[in-house]
Image: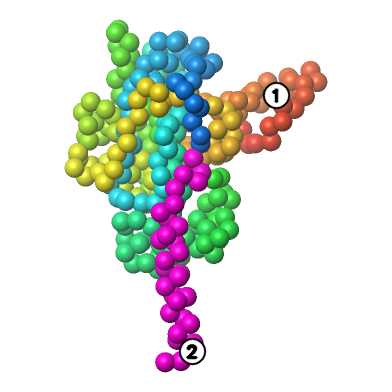
Amino acid sequence: MSVRNLLSRPFAVAALAVPLLASSTSGRALPRPVPGGPAEPSEVGAAIGAAINVAIERQSICVGSTVASAGELGDVLYYRSSPGERGEVSVGYYAFFSEERPWGNNWLTWTVLPALAVDLVYTHALLLGPGIQRVAYGKGDVEGFRILYRMDEAGRLAADHAVADRGDHGEVRLERSDLLSVDPARPTVYSRWWSHQLGGQGAGPDDLVYRRCYGAGAIRPLPPEVALDFRLDRRAAPARVVPAAALLGQPSPSRQGEAAAAGATDQGLAFLPTVAL
């Protein structure tokens, strides 16, 4: 056996082992939850009423998947909300995953080379530097979904329908029957793809490989600093219920012009696009 063959084997094994081992690490790009209880109601809560704000944070929501994939799901489900003209309320939820990589119980991994190719370009350039995903969207992986609720006279929320992403990043409407197909007591959104999009449909209670449910204390208003840190102005589009500027805690474009005319100073936030995605 030649020296070249002896050397090539370790390199081949390393090329397969490194991404697999790396995929087992977790928690590298998750927002840190605020210690203690739920955050105080935000300005959104003041707009739609404290009762609705409390109802949103107590409404249990579950996130799961029918396929095993890389990335740890965060401890907090952040939200923003917006009232409707007919008494309904639209709530956009942000689910944070530590990473988005193709390794897991899926066809990309079974065939090895496609997963390795994606990992070498999309997620980690040559397994070391930031890939296209990080440059285009930001750290970690954030998936968004939006649920339209109706509130009864007792202050309870009832999910009417939801909007989330499919695996091809196209939006899909999830009917109430879709949301309650896994658990009739708790709306559940789930993925069928390694990339975590939460627009899965057609699953039953026994089809999910994991499911995490969030309730009081784990569902919190989205802080502007988290939105800015994870660049939520340009990702997780189905969760968008307010303009990008408001999501980041910035005034609307018209208000920005007024502030500039009045000689207002920059508050230290980097310039970000304000066009809703």
Q: Is residue 23 above or below residue 214?
A: below
Q: Which residue is painted at 57% across and 55% down in the image?
A: 130
Q: Main secondary structure of the magenta part?
A: helix
Residue 156 percent location from the top left of the image: 30, 14
Q: Looking at the picture, tell me which residue is in the foreground, 141 or 212.
A: 212
Residue 133 percent location from the top left of the image: 52, 51
Q: Is residue 179 above or below residue 98?
A: above
Q: Looking at the picture, tell me which residue is in the foreground, 79 or 235.
A: 79
Give left or right: position of 253 versus 166: right
Residue 145 shown in magenta? no
- Check contact, mark 1 vs mark 2: CB within 8 A: no
**Which label belongs to residue 3?**
2
Q: Secondary structure at mark 2?
A: helix
| Three-letter amino acid code of the residue under disc 2 | Val
The answer, for residue 255, to whether it is visible in the render is yes
Q: Secondary structure at mark 1?
A: helix
Residue 178 percent location from the top left of the image: 25, 34
Residue highlighted by disc 1:
256
Q: Which residues are magenta?
A: 1-30
Q: Nearer the viewer, mark 1 or mark 2?
A: 2
Colour option used = rainbow
The answer, for residue 175, to whether it is visible in the render is no
Q: Which residue is painted at 58% across and 50% down in the image?
A: 135
| Three-letter amino acid code of the residue under disc 1 | Gln
Which quadrant would the N terminus be assigned to in this image? bottom left
Mark 1 nearby-residue class (10 Å; few <14, some 14–19, many ≥20): some
The answer for how far apart the CA atoms under marks 1 and 2 are is 66 Å
